[in-house]
Amino acid sequence: MKAVKLGQSAHPQIAQALQELADAIGKVMGHVSEVSTAVPGLTLYRNTLPTAPNPCTYVPSLLLIPQGKKRVDLGKQSYVFGGSTFLLTSIDLPIISRVCAASVERPYLAFFLKLDMGMVRDILHSEEVHVPPPPVGTRGMVLGEATLELLAPCSRMVQLLCTPQDVPFFGKLLQREIIYRLLQGPQGDRLRSVATLADQSYRTAKAVTWLRDNFKKTLNVDELASMTGMSRSTLNHHFRGLTAMSPLQFQKQLRLHAARQKMLTDELDAASAAFEVGYESPSQFNREYKRFFGQPPMRDIQALRATL
């Protein structure tokens, strides 16, 4: 598996800004592990131990980890980050994530902000913002190095939680500032490509959205390509570039993630979960599940429950 890493910044001002963000998150979290905040789109996380691999879907978002480290696997590519290195996701992507550095002395602390793509488009329409188009095949997930200009509004957003009466006014302003900083940075082309209506990445994003909402249905790639206004080969090329997977592989991962969640939370057996997510053959589901998660469905679920 290919791993992507960026070096930790040694700049003392960056280190101080990261510490301020970590302190702000720690103050809000106390000893809980997850807080869905009053600021739209903002969720905070805390862990004192590394976690088991967790399959889920990342939405367009910014993930900053001022303390600790995380690993996110997208297809065959692995992103390891923390400290001054953030993860920017510009499109819905099925991933496997795990906290890989956390302790009681230095808990893992994370700032996860779901990005409002309507706000991204609104900012892009401003004459003051000019973002070059990305190269063809640009992935919808990328690591970046945090700047003081990006960390400052993130810290203010967390601190805003101490004055709930100010959230409705300042919450949106701070998200606009964060999006502006991301668009102006080296990774801004990712957000631009998905938010710009005429761009091929935007058309590919429509295919991703359709698959996410209809993963139980039988996939006809030609119909999917027609829906996005692209040829089958063009869709395959751009889809693989953006998501690291073909449409069929993408659908398969969505189905497997959904089935795993149903077995874990709804206590369905493997065959029932398979049918629920669109599989017609339980034996095919079992084969693909074992290939993807490393062991048969019920054994995997038993192991997961043992860690909860």
Image (tube, grey):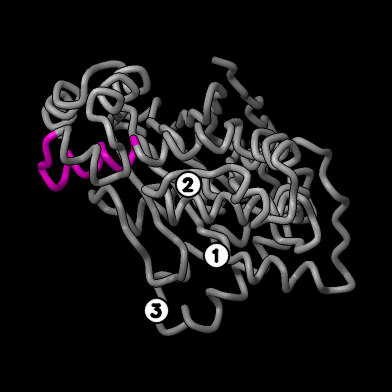
Of tags 2 and 1, the one toward the viewer is: 2
Who's the residue at 75% across and 35% down the image? 137
- Residue 26 position within the rendered picture, expressed as x and y whole percent measured from the top left: 36, 51
> Is residue 250 shown left or right of residue 55?
right
Separation of marks 2 and 1 at Cα, in angstroms: 24 Å
Looking at the picture, which amino acid does disc 3 mark?
Answer: Pro
* Sequence-wise first label, 2 or 1: 2
- Residue 106 position within the rendered picture, expressed as x and y whole percent measured from the top left: 36, 33
- Residue 152 position within the rendered picture, expressed as x and y whole percent measured from the top left: 63, 58
- Residue 85 position within the rendered picture, expressed as x and y whole percent measured from the top left: 61, 36
Residue 124 vs 55, above or below: the answer is below
* Sequence-wise first label, 1 or 3: 1
- Disc 3 designates what residue? 164
Q: Are marks 3 and 2 in contact (CB under 8 Å)?
A: no
Q: In the rendered image, which quarter is residue 263 located in?
A: top left
> Is residue 62 shown left or right of residue 46?
right
Residue neighbourhood size for the residue with mark 3, other residues' Cα within 10 Å, grouped as few (<14), some (14–19), many (≥20): few
- Disc 1 designates what residue? 156
For mark 2, give the secondary structure.
strand
Residue 164 vs 225, above or below: the answer is below
Looking at the picture, which amino acid does disc 2 mark?
Answer: Tyr
For mark 1, give the secondary structure.
helix
Who's the residue at 32% across and 22% down the image? 293
Whether residue 264 is visible: yes
Please provide the residue range marked out in magenta. Answer: 256-269
Q: Is residue 48 magenta?
A: no
- Disc 2 designates what residue? 58
